[in-house]
């Protein structure tokens, strides 16, 4: 794949929503690392990005944040260690699990 050299951050909302497992892996392995120097993803954890997919991406993750809902109309960014992102999310929202 030809490398794209975009010199500004690329923001991607719902990054894996429409991909099957094979395509998601290809996007993680080949597209995200080459699209720009900085890529910011906004996935719904466990829906648009699984733990397996995140582990593939983890070696390239510099920082991780969760959008933590404080009330129905107020939220905040919460920094967390990249390797603890999924577990931190699970701890914060365990009571909201289906």
Image (tube, rainbow, N blue to C red):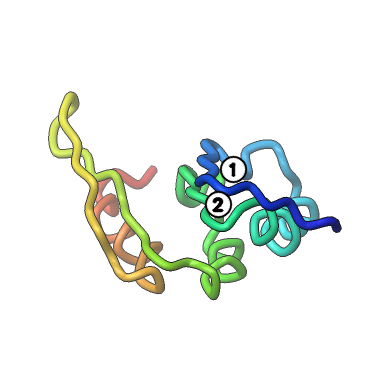
Please give the name of the residue rendered at 62% of the width and 38% of the height, measured from the top-left corner.
17
For the residue pair 33 and 92, the one nearer the viewer reads as: 33
Residue most extreme to the front: 7
Please give the name of the residue rendered at 22% of the width and 53% of the height, measured from the top-left corner.
78
Q: How many marks?
A: 2
User: Which residue in the protein does label 1 denote?
Assistant: 15
Residue 76 % position (x, y): 19, 42
In this picture, residue 10 sits left or right of residue 97: right
Marks 1 & 2, CB-CB < 8 Å contact: yes
User: Which residue in the protein does label 2 denote?
Assistant: 49
Residue 58 % position (x, y): 52, 70
Instruction: Categorize mark 2 by other alpha carbons within 10 Å: few (<14), some (14-19), many (20+).
Output: many
Cα separation between marks 1 and 2: 8 Å
Q: Quadrant of residue 64?
A: bottom left
Quadrant the C terminus occupies: top left
Residue 20 % position (x, y): 75, 47
Judging from the image, what secondary structure is the residue with disc 1 in? Answer: loop
Judging from the image, what secondary structure is the residue with disc 2 in? Answer: loop
Please give the name of the residue rendered at 54% of the width and 75% of the height, measured from the top-left corner.
59
Q: Quadrant of residue 80?
A: bottom left
For the residue pair 80 and 53, the one nearer the viewer reads as: 80
């Amino acid at each position: 794949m030809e490398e794209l050299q975009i010199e500004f951050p690329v923001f991607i909302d719902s990054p894996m929503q429409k991909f099957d497992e094979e395509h998601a892996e290809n996007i993680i392995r080949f597209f995200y690392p080459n699209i720009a120097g900085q890529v910011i993803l906004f996935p719904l954890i466990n829906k648009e990005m699984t733990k397996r997919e995140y582990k593939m991406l983890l070696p390239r993750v510099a920082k991780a944040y969760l959008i933590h809902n404080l009330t129905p109309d107020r939220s905040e960014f919460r920094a967390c260690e990249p390797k603890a992102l999924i577990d931190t999310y699970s701890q914060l929202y365990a009571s909201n699990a289906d």
